[in-house]
Amino acid sequence: MRSPHPALHALHVALDALPPPHSRQGPALGNWRWTVRQRLAGVRSLLLNETDTYGPAWRAPEGAGLLDARNTLLERVRVYDTLVLQSPEPDVVRRDLMRLLIDVDNHTVRVRDALAASPPA
């Protein structure tokens, strides 16, 4: 996934750096978990800043449901913020976060499209 959003790309790169199963003892896995959590914070910021960046799109008819979708994505980010550090199954966390990345990327496209369709202020 090559997203135009640096935060999404950074998380994708971090997720791809999951150590292989034979080297998940000691600091390697802990470092991966911490890096993923830091990159997840960038995704959270991206979502939180949408209301400032795309203000008119939230009020346009084309933007109906975008705020709810964003809040759902933020809740998923919040859940994984803790889970990435605690889960005994990093492969499952990685898979789920890859799905979240796709969903956030699709959401940003919908927001951008709604902004383009809304009348100028």
Image (tube, rainbow, N blue to C red):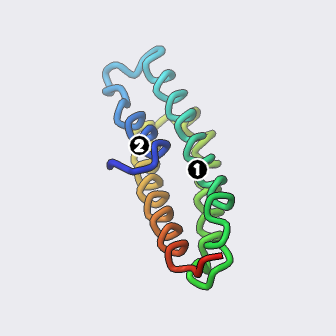
Query: Could you tell me residue 32's position as x and y percent?
Result: 46, 27
Q: Say which element carries label 2.
A: helix
Q: Amino acid at mark 2?
A: His
The residue positioned 61% from the left and 80% from the top of the image is: 64
Task: Place residue 25 in its image quadrant.
Answer: top left
Q: CA distance from mark 1 to mark 2?
A: 12 Å
- Furthest toward the top, the residue is 26
Q: Is residue 74 left or right of residue 7?
A: right
- Furthest toward the front, the residue is 121
Q: Say which element carries label 1.
A: helix
Classify mark 2: residues with Cα within 10 Å, few (<14), some (14-19) or many (20+): some
**Which is more toward the observer, 58 or 105?**
58
Q: Amino acid at mark 1?
A: Leu
Task: Determine which residue is flagged by label 1.
Answer: 46
Query: Could you tell me residue 58's position as x and y percent?
Result: 65, 72
The residue positioned 51% from the left and 79% from the top of the image is: 117
Number of numbered discs overlaid on the protein picture = 2
Residue 9: mark: 2
The residue positioned 41% from the left and 49% from the top of the image is: 98
Residue 37: mark: none
User: Against 119, is 44 above or below?
Assistant: above
